[in-house]
Amino acid sequence: MARSVFGGADYTAYPVYYGALPALWAPVVLGDADNRTAVRMTATMLGSYGAVVALKRLVRRPRPVAVHDWVIRRPAFPGGRDLDTWSWPSGHATLAAAVVGTLAFRHQRAAVTVPAVIWAGAVGGSRIWLGVHYPSDVLSGWALGAGMAWVVHQMRKNDEAGSLSEQPVFRFTIPLG
């Protein structure tokens, strides 16, 4: 059962990460769709990915498979192959929580949120099952991705126009006198 659940989650992770933005931006570019979810997803994913890269390079925690002989290596799965050297935080868990958090904060419907949270949980579990992350890597990745989604949601929640140019992400005042 673990092979089906975690293997399936691992196989779907990259298509979701790489497909989320084109799927959200295509109706905006090709038609006259609302761009608010696409803008939020873009900001959340870019912020989350940037934070993961920076933290991995700063902390440099080795992966469990490189440290412990008893960890089972599963290279037949996409996430079990040779990845970058560093473990903390889990990029997969971070991006899964970023995608799910953005959808949950934006749409707030159980029909969207519940299956997405289950999927994000399976993606995080797959990282431990594959031997490429410690549980703390996954938990902190979920917190980072969900936190980034929350921050973007808070910054953009009053955006009725749906455009970055009409509703700035940051506001500041320059005193002139």
Image: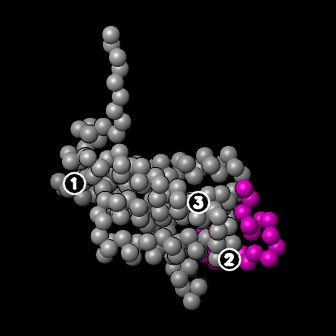
Secondary element under disc 2, as helix, strand or loop, is loop
For the question of whether residue 80 can be seen, the reply is: no
Instruction: Point out the image quarter for the N terminus.
Output: bottom right
CB atoms of marks 1 and 3 within 8 Å: no
Question: How far apart are the two marked residues, 1 and 3, measured between alpha carbons?
Answer: 32 Å
> What residue is shown with label 1?
34
> What residue is shown with label 2?
74
Q: Nearer the viewer, residue 30 or 85?
A: 85
Is 112 situated above or below 88?
below
What residue is at 29 percent from the left and 70 percent from the top? Answer: 109
- Left or right placement of residue 91 versus residue 112 in this view: right
Q: Is residue 68 magenta?
A: yes
Give the residue type that dot 1 points to.
Asp
Mark positioned earlier in the residue sequence (2 or 1): 1
What residue is at 59 percent from the left and 65 percent from the top? Answer: 138
Is 138 situated above or below 39?
below
What residue is at 30 percent from the left and 56 percent from the top? Answer: 37
- The x, y position of residue 13, in whole percent, is 49, 69
Secondary element under disc 3, as helix, strand or loop, is helix
Mark positioned earlier in the residue sequence (1 or 3): 1
- Left or right placement of residue 87 versus residue 10 in this view: right
- The x, y position of residue 56, in whole percent, is 65, 51
Magenta highlight range: 61-80
Mark positioned earlier in the residue sequence (2 or 3): 2
